[in-house]
């Protein structure tokens, strides 16, 4: 028995067998399915033997308009399932505006766990998973792309991005300019026939893809490892700068301490960063 509510239902990101038993149960019980693209989702529903169910679209353009219909359906005792084209709704997919309005209105919202490309890639990357940052799709324009990549230049967490095959090479080149030895994992076509996980330094990955251009296609998640200070960072700094950083990192954030010491000593900010990160990792 599926209780009346709005259910957030993840669907497979490639392999149809990845749908959960609970997702099937909810979709079968649904009196209304709100889908990012009804025609796309109909294919999945047909395969699951769910033919005759009322469907409405719910996408970036009409989410607000769907609030009343969905709330009324649940308030009348119905079961509504929210699905996107693939993976978990709302993760770089529509749904957030709808869910926030429904919650405000007191409608019961039940999330189901299930496939998500970001989490699947993070687990495959062999990079630290104790904390991570998900930044969705990278900006398209070069200036904003560079700014976004620079924002994680000294990050002490793993970062996960969605990226398109058309832009992946440019993105990797920009990342290499910022940090030539950064460890990355490129997760391609996960759960599908041509699933490939490339785990290497960014420069090596660029060379590999230049030689295997037929592999620059399909769907990608780019996982970027945390910044690692080069060995011997302290040897490149004056004793005065080292002492200043030893005093200031802790009371001040790494970034603030480096800015101050750069102003005081005229030392290179990147070298200060490298050394500061050997003293303390930001929380
Ligand atoms: N909501 C989805 C989720 O939970 O993963 C993501 C939707 S977003 C519009 C689609 C992007 O996710 C793709 O462009 C790609 O970056 C990534 N993606 C989805 N499926 C993938 C797969 N099987 N392998 C690699 N990346 C995938």
Image (cartoon, rainbow, N blue to C red):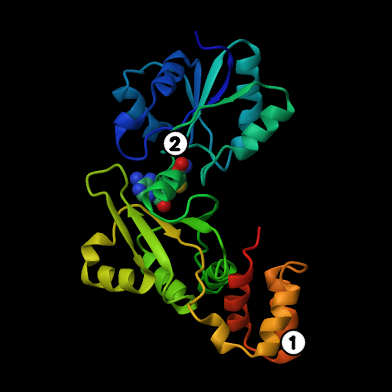
Indicate which disc residue 197 carries.
none
Indicate which disc residue 37 carries.
2
**Residue 57, image x, y percentages:** 50, 32
Q: Which residue is mark 1?
A: 263
> In which image quadrant can residue 239 be found?
bottom right
Which secondary structure, mark 1?
A: helix
Residue found 57% across the figure and 65% down from its top: 155
**Residue 171, image x, y percentages:** 43, 68
Binning the other alpha carbons within 10 Å of mark 1 as few (below 14), some (14 to 19) or many (20 upward) gives few
**Residue 243, image x, y percentages:** 70, 82
Q: Nearer the viewer, residue 90 or 180?
A: 180
Residue found 54% across the figure and 40% down from its top: 90
Q: Are marks 2 and 1 in contact (CB under 8 Å)?
A: no
Which quadrant does the C terminus fall into? Answer: bottom right
Look at the picture and state if 106 lies above or below 173: above
Does residue 72 show up?
Answer: yes
Q: Nearer the viewer, residue 147 or 69?
A: 147
Which secondary structure, mark 2?
A: loop
Specify whether 133 is left or right of 86. Answer: right
Closest to the camera, between mark 2 and mark 1, is 1
Does residue 167 show up?
Answer: no
> In which image quadrant can residue 23 be found?
top left
Residue found 61% across the figure and 16% down from its top: 74
Look at the picture and state if 156 lies above or below 112: below
Binning the other alpha carbons within 10 Å of mark 2 as few (below 14), some (14 to 19) or many (20 upward) gives some
Specify whether 235 is left or right of 254. Answer: left
Q: Earlier in the sequence, mark 2 or mark 1?
A: 2
């Amino acid at each position: 028995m599926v209780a009346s509510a709005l259910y957030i239902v993840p669907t497979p990101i490639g392999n149809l067998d990845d749908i959960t038993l609970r997702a099937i149960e909810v979709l079968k019980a649904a009196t209304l399915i709100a889908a990012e693209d009804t025609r796309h989702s109909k294919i999945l529903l047909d395969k699951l033997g769910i033919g005759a169910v009322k469907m409405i679209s719910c996408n970036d353009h009409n989410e607000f308009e769907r609030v009343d219909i969905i709330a009324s359906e649940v308030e009348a005792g119905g079961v509504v399932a929210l699905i996107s084209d693939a993976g978990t709704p709302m993760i770089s997919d529509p749904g957030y505006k709808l869910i926030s309005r429904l919650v405000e209105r007191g409608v019961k919202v039940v999330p189901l766990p299930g496939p998500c490309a970001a989490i699947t890639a993070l687990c495959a990357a062999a990079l630290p998973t104790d904390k991570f940052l998900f930044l969705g799709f990278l900006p398209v324009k070069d200036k904003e792309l560079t700014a976004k990549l620079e924002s994680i230049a000294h990050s002490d967490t793993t970062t996960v991005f969605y990226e398109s095959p058309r832009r992946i090479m440019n993105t990797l080149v920009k990342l290499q300019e910022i940090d030539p030895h950064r460890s990355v994992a490129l997760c391609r076509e996960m759960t599908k026939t041509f699933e490939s996980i490339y785990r290497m330094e960014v420069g090596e990955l660029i060379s590999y893809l230049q030689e295997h251009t037929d592999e620059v296609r399909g769907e990608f998640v780019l996982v970027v490892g945390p910044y690692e200070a080069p060995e011997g960072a302290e040897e490149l700094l004056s004793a005065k700068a080292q002492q200043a950083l030893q005093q200031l990192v802790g009371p001040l954030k790494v970034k603030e301490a480096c800015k101050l010491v750069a102003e005081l000593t005229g030392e290179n900010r990147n070298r200060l960063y490298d050394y500061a990160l050997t003293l303390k990792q930001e929380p």
